[in-house]
Amino acid sequence: MSAFCDRSVALSAGQQDKLLRFAGVVREELGNADAALVSRSGLDLSRFQIRYSHAAVAWRDGAGSWSARQLYYACDERRPRIFDQGLAGFTMGIDDPSLGYITIVRLPPDAADALRRAALDTPRALHLLAADYSANAYPFSLRYQNCNQWVIELLAMAWGDLADGIDLRERAQGWLRGAGYAPEPVAVGSRLLMLAAPFIPFIHLDDHPAPERDAMLLRVSLPSTIEAFVHARLPGSERIELCHDGRQVVVHRGWTPIAAGCKPGEGDRVVLLD
């Protein structure tokens, strides 16, 4: 899922300063790897019990600067695009400036190197880009794509060593099926939300199997489904979750979620912002 039509939140100077300092802690936690997976809390999806909405590939250039390569929905063009964004900008894309969450998944060196090379192979990365965007795209259809679906297909291209070609997305999805990628369905829980879908330009249902639509259970690629796949496939990966509440940054290590409300637990690192 990506941001709803380039929405932006006006930030005060104090909020900008704290978010930049938060981004600095994120940068520290990325370490010296060449690439990692990063996700942020963007849209408020708490009604679906979802904290993270947007994933990207973080990569480091020769000068040591980090960027996030990602898919976004260009509202004026009504189509998806790929773009690079500095780490500070990616962090500031969190919708709520008073409470934000970021995850980092650091990969084993070989997997990180393969991902970086795939992400920066622009012709192949663009061949993975669908013509049409849907925030709730079905993971095994070629009709639409969301930001997280592009990332998981990029992982398939990288780790499956898939050659370029016009059928690259189809082969990437086939590789993912064979590798056991199986997102848990999201319970929509409201018939009204399903009925509203045709009136929202970046929400579609026609790619989802009819039984799942009828049950209001939609399988969608999310940061959590990508992380679960990576954890199962590469047990040596390391997950770091960071949050800030305007007063402090909490750094939590491990595959269990950080406490709600950005509360530090035992063993968590705390960096004061005030």
Image: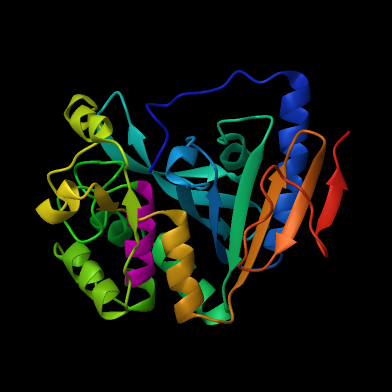
The foreground one among 115 and 232 is: 232
Q: Quadrant of the N terminus?
A: top left
Query: Nearest the camera: 30 or 64?
Result: 30
Residue in the picture at 42% in, 26% down: 6
Q: Residue at x 23, y 67 (%)?
A: 173
Q: Which residues, given as a range, are shown in magenta?
A: 147-156
Q: Is residue 54 above or below residue 202?
A: below
Position of 154 relative to 49 (above/below): below
Q: Is residue 63 visible?
A: no
Main SS of residues in magenta: helix
Q: Position of residue 239 (x, y in %)?
A: 62, 66
Spot occupied by residue 73 in the image (x, y as percentages of width and height):
34, 36
- Residue 63 horizontal/vertical position (percent): 67, 56
Say if the magenta span includes residue 224.
no
Q: Quadrant of residue 195?
A: top left
Q: Residue at x 89, y 33 (%)?
A: 274
Q: Is residue 260 left or right of residue 207?
A: right
Corner quadrant of residue 150: bottom left
Determine if residue 173 is in view. Answer: yes
Q: In which quadrant of the rendered view does residue 98 lie?
A: top right
What residue lies at 56% left-to-right and 65% top-to-bottom? 35
- Of 161 and 236, nearer the camera is 236
When the figure is inspected, residue 75 is found, relative to residue 12, above or below; the finding is: below
- In this orientation, which residue lies closer to the viewer: 163 or 108? 108
Drawn side of residue 128 relative to residue 223, left or right:
left
Whole-percent x and y of residue 60? 60, 59
Q: Is residue 151 highlighted in magenta?
A: yes
Q: Count the labels in the image.
A: 0
